[in-house]
Amino acid sequence: MQSRRTFSRWQRFGIGLGLYAAAVALGLGSAWWALKKAPWMVQTVQVGAWRGNLLAGSPDADMYTRASIALNALLALGRDETMYFIASHDDSGHPLRARCSYRVEGVPPKARWWSVTAYADDMYLFEAPNKRYSLNGTTAQLDANGHFAFTTGGQEQPGTHWLPTPGNRGLVLTLRLYNPEPDLQAAPASLNPPTISALGACT
């Protein structure tokens, strides 16, 4: 007859502790996945290559939305004060990469003030040798058609406002609109988005 295996008190404690640690790890992992990898939990609008969070800074935002915004380093105000759009792909749908060069061009958004900032994929600023991290409503120079433009990448493009993005990692562009006009607040999808075009081949 096969004997039943018995465990000492310390063995039972060790097994229980292991199961508890596994449960905590699973819980933390699923929470991280929900906040970082589950975009359906956040109400968004897609305009060109740009995605806007419609609940950022809103009292209607649920706990997942608020936690996701906090985790992704976005200090959000209400839509009447500030609107946020991010781009992690170019207009062709290819992921933005720091080592590649891009031209970003558009018309000034309908807002009192605006800015476009280049972030690494960890949402921290790049170490820019020229101390340029963004283009905004003050520094933008408009052409004859009323368009602004700037470039990003590891190599400066002559004759442009260049935002250095050194390294080989992901690139995220963030468009902030301060005090957007009421019609844009009411219909974020009406934004005339800046275009994002790759300059040359990038592998």
Image (spheres, rainbow, N blue to C red):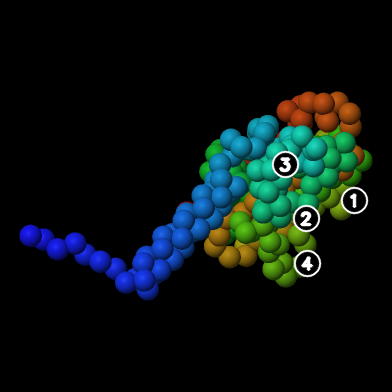
Q: Is residue 101 left or right of residue 127?
A: left
User: Tag 1 or tag 4, which sits nearer the N-term?
Assistant: 4
Tell me the distance, in whole angstroms, between the alpha carbons under discs 4 and 1: 16 Å
Foreground disc of the pair 2, 3: 3
Q: Is residue 149 left or right of residue 181?
A: left
Tell me the distance, in whole angstroms, between the alpha carbons under discs 2 and 1: 11 Å
Q: Residues within 10 Å of mark 2 (few under 14, many from 20)?
A: many
- Quickly name the residue at label 1: 138
Q: Residues within 10 Å of mark 1 (few under 14, many from 20)?
A: few
> Percent position (x, y) of residue 28?
54, 55
54 up-or-down from 23: above or below: above
The residue at 14%/63% (across/down) is 3
The residue at 73%/38% (across/down) is 61
> Answer yes or no: do the residues labelled 3 and 4 have beta carbons within 8 Å?
no
- Quickly name the residue at label 3: 85
Q: Secondary structure at mark 3?
A: strand
Q: Residues within 10 Å of mark 4 (few under 14, many from 20)?
A: few
Q: Which mark is residue 188?
A: none
User: Tag 4 or tag 3, which sits nearer the N-term?
Assistant: 3
> Answer yes or no: do the residues labelled 4 and 1 have beta carbons within 8 Å?
no
- Residue 26 in view in this figure: yes
> Percent position (x, y) of residue 195?
68, 39
> Percent position (x, y) of residue 112?
92, 40
Q: Which quadrant of the structure image shows residue 131?
A: bottom right
- Quickly name the residue at label 2: 134
Q: Amino acid at mark 3?
A: Phe
Tell me the distance, in whole angstroms, between the alpha carbons under discs 3 and 4: 23 Å
User: Tag 1 or tag 3, which sits nearer the N-term?
Assistant: 3
Figure label count = 4
Tell which of 133 and 15 is nearer to you: 15
Tell me the distance, in whole angstroms, between the alpha carbons under discs 3 and 1: 19 Å
